[in-house]
Image: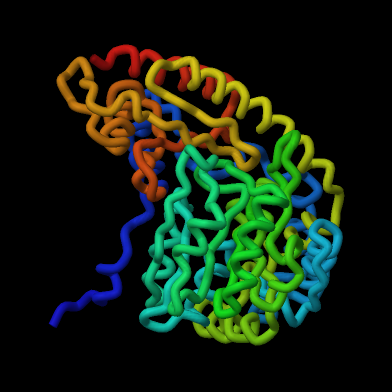
Amino acid sequence: MTFLSKTLSRVKPSPTIAISTQAAELRAAGRDIIGLSAGEPDFDTPAHIRAAGIRAIEAGHTRYTAVDGIPELKEAICAKFARDNGLSYTPRQVSVGTGGKQVLYNALMATLNPGDEVIIPAPYWVSYPDMVALAGGTPVIVEATLETGFKLTAEALEAAITPRTKWLLFNSPSNPTGAGYGHSELRALTDVLLRHPHVHVMTDDMYEHIAYSGFHFCTPAQVEPGLYDRTLTVNGVSKAYAMTGWRIGYAAGPEALIGAMRKIQSQSTSNPCSISQYAALEALSGPQDVIAEGVAIFQRRRDLVVDALNAIPGIACPRPEGAFYVYPSIHGLIGRKTPQGRVIDSDEAFASALLEDTGVAVVFGAAFGLSPHFRISYAAADDALQQACTRIAAFCASLS
């Protein structure tokens, strides 16, 4: 009898965390490393939000709270959904967790039985398939390629649905591609879902507010009210408000589902950090101008990186609608060799050789379910991005 659970055989360690860790180790060893693998804003949490956290400490808000969020924060989340998305929820329909990842995991644990299928468009956030597997479900990966703008088509969704399908797990704007679905694109998908009433929608809207000129964010239950009772709308404060370390995510959906998620959270972590909840309350209820300021910086960085990468022979980089990632193709580089004789036979080999030879840390596309690509997070200083693109160009030029 083995000591460790067989469940572990169904999951892999997070590649993004592994690469960030490797880059940190190389930096500690004295290497000049430019890390473009971490998915978090490089800004400080805004001052008024930090101050709210300090006030919470000084006011003694340092004890247990309700399992899935303080009432004031739930009210603020309801107000946010009404204000930004035209969606009406009550606090009983809201769950607050320790980051969006926990909220997603709670929902999967609360609903999946062995044999249940979850449709996941690829490229996907690295944790989606493993969370589904941990919860006992079966990930059904549907490729959304460069030719479709990395977006799931209605035809591909229809073809993937079976009697066992329980969820479509959906992310827009996307990590890792930055692709965002417009109203008509979402309408095509929701029309398919209306024909299959046994399929529910779990929509990860974490990058909602990081949307660029010409793109207008919308979410499935907003586009099709007929899906309201079948949709869990997930969001959080980590990206828009530069609060990754505060660990607050939230979701709204059917009251029965929220109650089941609350039960799971009550027997795992219990409440999210009390101090972080009060900071999140200020983020959602306080001044929102900090979002536009951050988006303007990210859009400038996006254009810098896209233009630089598209100037490199062998790389093709689409211009994302949102988030702070690019997902360039390296199809034109596969099969080439480094000066040391290493064959670039995969995007993993490309990312590994790039890190070893130039000190630029990116994430290989296979981690996100679609190759041959790599992901860059441009949540980094402009000069670091410019230097990284220069190093990438030199590396690619050295390949034969």
Is 32 above or below relative to 43?
above
Answer left or right for 295 relative to 140. right
- Seen from the viewer's position, the closer of residues 105 and 54 is 105
Judged from this view, the residue extending furthest toward the left is 1
| Image position, residue 39 (x, y; %) | 53, 44
Is 175 above or below relative to 64?
above
| Image position, residue 113 (x, y; %) | 42, 83
User: Is residue 349 something one can see in this rendering?
Assistant: yes
Residue at image location 57% in from the left, 86% down from the top: 263
Total labels: the figure holds 0
- Seen from the viewer's position, the closer of residues 99 and 46 is 99
Is 225 above or below relative to 205?
below
Answer left or right for 158 relative to 62. left
Answer left or right for 196 relative to 165. right
Residue at image location 35% in from the left, 30% down from the top: 331
The N terminus lies in which quarter of the figure? bottom left
Residue at image location 53% in from the left, 83% down from the top: 264
User: Is residue 294 something one can see in this rendering?
Assistant: no
| Image position, residue 238 (x, y; %) | 64, 52
| Image position, residue 233 (x, y; %) | 66, 66
Tell me which corner region of the image, top left, top right, bottom left or bottom right, holds residue 359: top left
Q: How is the image coloured?
A: rainbow
The C terminus lies in which quarter of the figure? top left
- Seen from the viewer's position, the closer of residues 200 and 337 is 200
- Seen from the viewer's position, the closer of residues 288 and 88 is 88
